[in-house]
Amino acid sequence: MKAAALLATVKGKIIAAAVAVTVVGGATAGVIVANNMGYRTIAVEEVSGTVVAKSETRDGQIMEGEQLYGGDYVQVATKSGLTMCTDNTKYLYADEDTSFKLEAGDRKDKGDIRILMDAGSTLHKIEKKLGKGENYQVDTPNSTMSVRGTTFRVTVYKGKDGLSYTLTEVTDGEVVVALKTEDGTYTGVEESFGPGESALMRGNDVFSEFVPGNSAGDTWVLDYNKLPEDSVDRLIALLKNSEHDHVAGEWIVTLEPACETTGTRVKQCLICDKIMETEVLEALGHKLGDWEVTLEPACETKGEKAIKCTVCGSVLETEEIKATGHADAEWVVVEEPGCETQGKRAKACPICGKEFKTEKIKATGHKYGDWIETTAPTCTAKGERKQVCSVCGKENVQSVAANGHNWEELSRETPTCDPDEPEAYSHQKCRTCGATQDVQLARPAHNFQVTDYINVCGYWRDPDCLHSGMHATQCTVCQQLNNFVEEPALGHDWYVDYEEQDQGDPSITMYHWECRRCDESTVNTTGQAPASDYQGS
């Protein structure tokens, strides 16, 4: 199972650093994979970024498909991730900045699986019920959870008050939370939580307790849509809403005082950031400096001088300085005219350099020489000629049309109308360049007629009552057959020639039928015309 699929089982990320989770005959996520022989190995399914495993025998980056072992200490770096699977049914996804130690037996049917977490983010999912005697435990400083559900998340946060906070969120199944202090002593207090419920715990090496929930008892019902996606932020949001004694910190300047405006400083609760005390800091007042020129006057623009505050730089007083005006000058050509481009002359102020008067100078035009053939045309390729400007060197280039071939016929074949005969060609050669070409000649048209062959073979016959007709023609030159047209048989055209009573049974009428097209005849007693394709026996 890849990390993306694993994360899709719950909302948001999971960050766990100080919670213990134990699965006894239940279902959640894991990191150990068992093979068919019953031996337990740790299989790495997916690695992104930097993930290092350390033990007495190893210290380095781990890769997909690699195995981990009990005693390995795993560290997932920033912007990295790790997915592991145990027994093909227990999955664990470790988010960035996560570290934990693995403890596991060699066989899946003996010994516990323990994940001793220091910091970071883990998501657990077990898809198959654990076997008898099989235990799965995630251990953190201040609580142990026996998991009977299939999916849950654990988040740990170290508060500003020095306490460790643990948030357990149940997505599916049941989780039993047992409280313990950071030195490992269990308090004897435990409580069960189901799907959609969460538990918030806090403690240190002296005590461990449930934080009262926002519903009955110690249960927290979380609105995931209103909490930040990041799990630590979710936990901080819960801490700020929980009941606690405020702890005031040092003065913090939230707004520095300025020359004209007051500032503020506050004391905040170290747990929930609530402002407990506020003071106003008096405005400092301006300090006047000397006159300074802030904008030098120019030929056309005014200048300015000002007195500023030496603290904040605010302008307290200003005075205008008059513009100096331009000085006259002689005409100067600033852009020489070219063959195609205009030139320019101008009068520029010797003080500021601005052109205060300009005039255009006309382009001189090109001075082209005689035509020079640079490439002679051939039968198939264009030629080229050019003129060159004696002033700027620009070339006026023109193409010269190709001469075309001067063909003469060397020999000619006689075409026939027979398609089985080869094509006929006119063989030609250019008188100028010697190139050759074969020009295919059109075949003459067939002379299709009704020949003796057509009549003898029966390809020209009219249809009768029982036989189809056929019409075809044959070319008198190449003997090719064409225009086969088959006409269907006409069928009998029956009529009743006469009627009579059966001599043996006068109640029966005998109908004598005759065909108008042929000599065929027949008798029946139905009075209905025989079939059009009737053939007498």
Image (cartoon, rainbow, N blue to C red):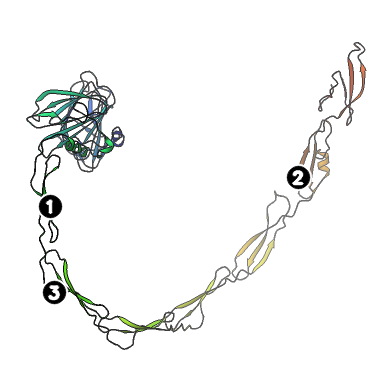
Name the foreground residue: 235 vs 130: 235
Label 2: few (<14), some (14–19) or many (≥20) C-alpha neighbours in 10 Å: some
Q: Which residue is mark 3?
A: 291
Name the foreground residue: 140 vs 523: 140
Residue 482's label in the rendered image is 2
Task: Give the Cα separation between the discs numbered 2 and 1.
Answer: 110 Å
Relative to residue 147, is residue 400 depicted above or below?
below
Q: Quadrant of residue 87?
A: top left
Q: Secondary structure at mark 1?
A: strand
Q: Earlier in the sequence, mark 2 or mark 3?
A: 3
Outermost residue, bottom side: 330
Relative to residue 360, is residue 63 depicted above or below?
above
Relative to residue 500, is residue 268 depicted above or below?
below
The mark total stands at: 3
| Residue at figure coordinates x 27%, y 79% from the top left | 300
Q: Quadrant of residue 143?
A: top left
**Mark 2 or mark 3, whichever is nearer to me:** 3
Name the foreground residue: 105 vs 291: 291
Name the foreground residue: 480 vs 515: 515
Q: Quadrant of residue 277?
A: top left
Q: Is residue 74 visible?
A: no
Q: Earlier in the sequence, mark 1 or mark 3?
A: 1
Q: Secondary structure at mark 2?
A: strand
Q: Position of residue 211 (x, y in %)?
A: 15, 30
Look at label 1 and name its amino acid: Thr
Q: Which residue is mark 1?
A: 264
Asked if labels 1 and 2 touch by Cβ distance under 8 angstroms, the answer is no
Task: Give the Cα separation between the discs numbered 2 and 3.
Answer: 115 Å
Q: Position of residue 6 (x, y in %)?
A: 29, 33
